[in-house]
Image (tube, rainbow, N blue to C red):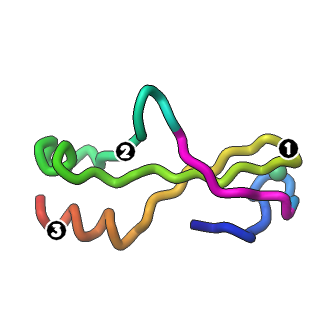
């Protein structure tokens, strides 16, 4: 997570971590990944929310993404 970082849009420092939600958590899946691998594991999308301008930055843990791609 980029907690404590400046907002990429406005440069503000009032950025807090959070989660992007629908009826459940949201995961990313690279287009060349096998679907069943990501259904079992997935890479959770975390967000950083700027309380100054409303910008929402989506982030994943790169090491998690790389380890899942190796399993595909
Ligand atoms: Zn901002």
Q: Which quadrant: the N terminus?
A: bottom right
69 lies left or right of 1: left
**Secondary structure found at label 3:** helix
Q: Is mark 1 on a helix, strand or loop?
A: loop
Of badges 2 and 3, the one in the foreground is: 2
Residue extending furthest toward the front: 24
Q: Do the residues labelled 2 and 3 touch (CB within 8 Å)?
A: no
Answer yes or no: disc 1 within 8 Å of ligand 1. yes
Give the number of the disc on residue 70: 3
Left or right, 67 with respect to 21, comes to: left
> Quick one: quadrant of the C terminus?
bottom left
Q: How many marks are shown on the rendered structure? A: 3
Dot 2: element: strand
Choose the circle earlier in sequence order: 2 or 1.
Answer: 2
Q: Position of residue 57 (x, y in %)?
A: 63, 50
Residue 40 image position (x, y, % from top left): 16, 48
Residue 12 found in image quarter:
bottom right
Residue 27 is tagged as 2
Q: Look at the image and give the residue range highlighted in magenta.
A: 13-20
Residue at label 1?
53
């Amino acid at each position: 997570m980029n907690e404590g970082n400046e907002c990429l849009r406005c440069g503000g420092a009032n950025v807090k971590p959070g989660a992007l939600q629908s009826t459940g958590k949201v995961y990313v899946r690279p287009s060349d990944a096998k679907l069943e691998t990501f259904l079992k594991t997935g890479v959770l999308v975390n967000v950083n929310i700027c309380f100054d301008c409303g910008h929402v930055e989506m982030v994943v843990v790169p090491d998690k993404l790389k380890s899942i791609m190796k399993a595909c």
